[in-house]
Amino acid sequence: MRFLVAGATCALLLPTVTHAADAHDLISPARCELRFNRLMNCQLPQALLTTPTAETAVPLRTTLRSVVSGNCSTQYPLEARAETAGASPVFIPYLQNNKEVRLRAAGGAPVSAFTLSDASTWTASAVLDSSCRISLEIHWNEVDVSSTGEAQALITALNADIAAAESHADRMEELMLYQRAYAFMYSLADQFRTELSNESMQELRAAALEAGPAVESMILNCADLSFEERLALLRLHGSLWVLGQPEDWQRPDGTVMTMEDHLGPGASEILARLNAILARQTGNPPDYAQLYEAAKTEIVRLKNKKSLALAQLAPWLP
């Protein structure tokens, strides 16, 4: 098996620029035996044709065109086969002058290489006039649009991708802020709960309840107190209720209440769900700050892609 490498042209062919096509010889004295003014026993060995590729924002196609000159009349249906990775092969009935077929890579990606081979069992049997010359023009990676409508549809799709990426970035920002706020607020609230339900605070509440009647008696019955002193004691007595009672911070079994106990059944159910989510993510919790940065980077990439697409599609856009 022999492989030939064709000359390379620019992979990103914009319609506004004229590029010389590669040419590959199919029928000529170099491919056939010249006997009795006839071309006989023609051979079309398999060839690997390659070209450099460039970034593209729109689908591309590679056009293969047969160029026929001289007398190439024959009864045999000669054709070649072109195939690139990840795509269906195309067949070129190259006896027809200016016959075009289009080779497309998967997803409209640039074609960097394709294999050209003989697809006919009759090639060696054909007897052609010595004037017959057939070559294959290869127009690498042209923009795969044929109308303004197709070009506008590609730009519309890119606009939709950008809008979706921006929406995703907004969502990641919300989750990033929520993740930070939830962690902070839960930690802060739990710290307050711990401080307000520790042993010293419980003793203070018990002492306040025990001292309440004595303070009331002093306010009402102690004749040695001035008006200002009575007023100060009254304010103190009126503030003691803020401390609450020790049982307000305890479960029926005497243990300290948790955050869920304080929030009540409705809120504690929501908190339980959030904690369950966090528990499942303990091994590898999502970093929403990193995801947000990645989402912003994707927006920039898509906008750059749109700029490139506008340049590539300029001949078809109003």
Image (cartoon, helix red, strand yellow):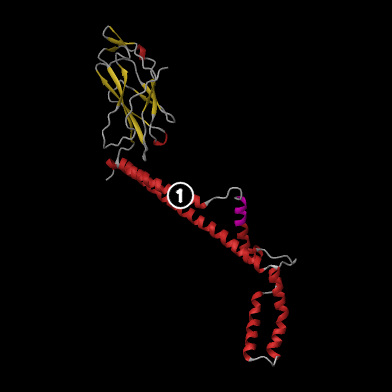
Q: Could you say where residue 311 lies in the image, as x and y percent from the top left?
A: 31, 42
Judge left or right: residue 177 versus residue 96: right
- Residue plotted at (33% across, 35% down): 12
Q: Quadrant of residue 136?
A: top left
Residue flagged by tag 1: what amino acid is it?
A: Ala
Q: Which one is in front, 57 or 148? A: 57
Position of the N terminus, as image quadrant, is: top left
| Image quadrant occupied by the C terminus | top left
Image check: 69 left or right of 282? left
Percent position of residue 53, x then y:
37, 33
State the image quarter where residue 2 is shown. top left
Q: Residues within 10 Å of mark 1 (few under 14, many from 20)?
A: many
Q: Residue furthest top?
A: 36
Q: Position of residue 67 (x, y in %)?
A: 28, 23
Quarter of the rendering containing residue 222: bottom right
Depth order, front residue of 218/109:
218
Q: Is residue 168 above or below residue 266?
A: above
Q: Nearer the viewer, residue 295 or 145?
A: 295
| Residue 140 percent location from the top left of the image | 33, 30
What residue span does the magenta drawing correspond to?
274-280
Residue 278 lies in the magenta-colored region: yes
- Mark 1: secondary structure: helix
- Above/below status of 161 relative to 5: below
Please say whether residue 88 is one of the residues in the magenta stretch: no
Q: Which residue is mark 1?
A: 295
Left-right relation of 112 to 289: left
